[in-house]
Image (cartoon, rainbow, N blue to C red):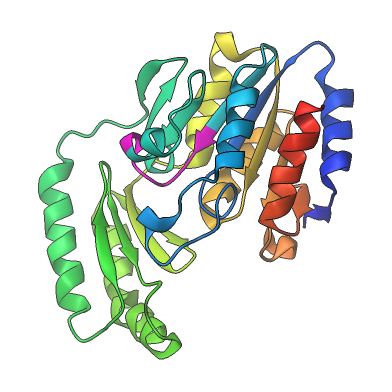
């Protein structure tokens, strides 16, 4: 269960916890830095957000990471900021310290992804308001445009098939807000954060992770097992493993401003 915290309260905790360590600040993108939009391409960063991230990325005692379910190339295009670190595809690929990272090998995925995509199309032929996004390591099914009735129909149409995907293929199912993602087993934001924290060059650091979705839960757990804190934005804080919670996205921006100071 997450405890409500203010931007000033979180900054106070960070300052008292650093103890000559660097701050590793990991930020989810959709729903955390920017509002959700009907289509992913419409969720653009505001000029103010870009200015905040530019300032954060230049702080010598800060390491700032944006971690997203979006492909790495896409998140880098949205936030073209020198010094910023990136993790895309829910932890499958990244760019850390200007160097490309592959958290999960992409070999042998092409044929299986095509087969899974074809199966999705067949199962959803009678449904409306959905579309499939091809990603470097998986598939995302979006149904933000579906009516509540169609959303229920989509979920019911896929229930048994998704169970087979888990048992018969080396893929996991990630349920998010108005969407489902198919990812290779072992790919998660938590696994990526664990590898980043294990790298000697990130130590000593105090890790903070802010996110809003189910996909962020594994990262909350990893960060907190390594002495840091997780912050859940909006949603049901009682069901989250994050220690703290913000009520809305505007508090994330306020926290960044307070963290930077005058």
Q: Quadrant of residue 260?
A: top right
Inspect the magenta stretch and tell me whether residue 164 lies in it: no
Q: Residue at x 85, y 25 (%)?
A: 15
Q: Quadrant of residue 185?
A: top left
Inspect the magenta stretch and tell me whether residue 72 lies in it: yes
- The reply to whether residue 106 is visible in this rendering is yes
Q: Nearer the viewer, residue 177 or 260?
A: 260
Q: Residue at x 46, y 30 (%)?
A: 86
Above or below, comparing residue 121 to residue 47 in the picture? below
In the image, residue 8 lies at what x, y percent? Answer: 87, 40
Is residue 51 found left or right of 256 in the rendered image? left
Q: Quadrant of residue 105?
A: top left
Q: Residue at x 32, y 59 (%)?
A: 166
In the image, residue 81 lies at what x, y percent? Answer: 48, 26
In this figure, what is the number of numbered marks?
0
In the image, residue 102 lies at what x, y percent? Answer: 33, 26
Residue stretch rendered in magenta on the structure:
66-73
Above or below, comparing residue 119 to residue 166 in the picture? below
Is residue 85 found left or right of 248 in the rendered image? left
Q: Nearer the viewer, residue 95 or 104?
A: 95
């Amino acid at each position: 269960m997450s405890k409500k915290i203010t931007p000033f309260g979180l900054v106070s905790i960070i300052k008292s916890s650093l103890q000559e360590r660097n701050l590793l600040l990991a930020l989810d993108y959709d729903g955390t830095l920017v509002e959700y939009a009907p289509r992913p391409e419409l969720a653009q960063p505001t000029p103010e957000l870009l200015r905040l991230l530019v300032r954060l990325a230049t702080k010598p005692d800060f390491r700032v990471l944006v971690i997203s379910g979006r492909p790495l190339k896409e998140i880098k295009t949205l936030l073209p900021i020198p010094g910023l670190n990136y993790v895309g595809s829910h932890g499958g690929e990244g760019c850390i310290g200007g160097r490309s990272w592959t958290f999960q090998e992409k070999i042998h995925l092409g044929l299986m992804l095509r087969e899974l995509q074809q199966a999705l199309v067949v199962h959803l032929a009678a449904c409306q308001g959905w579309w499939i996004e091809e990603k470097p390591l998986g598939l995302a099914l979006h149904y933000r445009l579906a009516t509540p009735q169609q959303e229920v129909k989509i979920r019911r149409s896929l229930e048994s098939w998704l169970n087979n995907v888990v048992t018969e293929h080396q893929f996991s199912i990630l349920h998010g807000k108005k969407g489902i993602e198919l990812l290779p087993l072992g790919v998660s934001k938590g696994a990526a954060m664990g590898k980043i924290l294990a790298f000697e060059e990130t130590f000593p650091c105090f890790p903070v992770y802010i996110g809003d979705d189910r996909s962020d839960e594994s990262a909350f757990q990893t960060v907190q097992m390594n002495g840091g804190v997780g912050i859940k934005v909006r949603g049901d804080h009682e069901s989250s493993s994050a220690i703290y919670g913000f009520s809305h996205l505007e508090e994330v921006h306020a926290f960044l401003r307070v963290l930077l100071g005058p």
